[in-house]
Image (spheres, grey):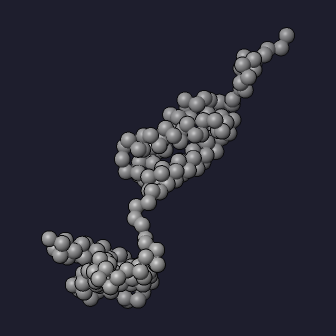
Amino acid sequence: MTQRDPTARRGLRAVPTGGDHYANWQSVYEDNVVWVYRTIYARVGNRPDAEDLTAEVFLAALRPLRLTVTKAEVRAYLRTTARTVLAAHWRETLGREITSIPDMQDIADRPPEAEESISTAPQHARAVLDALPDNYRRILELRFLQSCSIKESAAKMGVTVANAKVLQHRALRLAAQINEQDLS
């Protein structure tokens, strides 16, 4: 008499439990939950969202993922699922209209007295830039007005990339301080 696999009658397949496969869903969860949570937390920055999104990752992976695949394949699938869940989260969170841009026709139809209501941000930004030392102003103009990379900016200024990064950081910090003084 041949022995039957006890899982066969329930429609389940025997799963190899060697070192390269998971024995059950509990072991998949226990082995991967920490790195999935940390990955998501590093991107969303708050505990409640990270916990919810981690749960979403495992729920999304539960149906299509098979225990017969290797641990490396499980991790790769969970990583891809986490990326998809994060993308959906950011699309939902940031996908709403935050600001609107008026049609060009609306701007052309404005009476001349309405010109005062047009933003003074470019003039304010220029005033803040003019208040900065030359090297700080130059790095910010290259990076943000001329859209140069940090490497291109460093080359144009004749400094190292590391020095350009420091200059940019200090310039932004000083510009923020100048902006705060102007607002108060």
Q: Is residue 80 above or below residue 4?
A: below
Q: Position of residue 89 (x, y in %)?
A: 48, 50
Residue pictured at 28% horizontal, 74% vertical: 172
Residue pictured at 79% horizontal, 14% vertical: 3
**Residue in front for this viewpoint, 77 or 161:** 77
Examine the rendering and report whether any part of residue 37 can be seen.
yes
Horizontal side of residue 31 vs 142, given as left or right? right
Horizontal side of residue 54 vs 175, given as left or right? right
**Residue in front for this viewpoint, 131 or 157:** 131
Q: Is residue 157 above or below residue 95?
A: below
Examine the rendering and report whether any part of residue 121 can be seen.
no
Residue pictured at 72% horizontal, 19% vertical: 10
Horizontal side of residue 122 vs 54, given as left or right? left
Q: Position of residue 112 (x, y in %)?
A: 32, 85
Q: Quadrant of residue 67?
A: top right
Residue pictured at 57% horizontal, 47% vertical: 81
Q: Quadrant of the N terminus?
A: top right
Query: In the orientation shown, which residue stands out farthest toward the right?
Result: 1
**Residue in front for this viewpoint, 135 or 6:** 135
Q: Quadrant of residue 148?
A: bottom left
**Residue in front for this viewpoint, 105 or 13:** 105
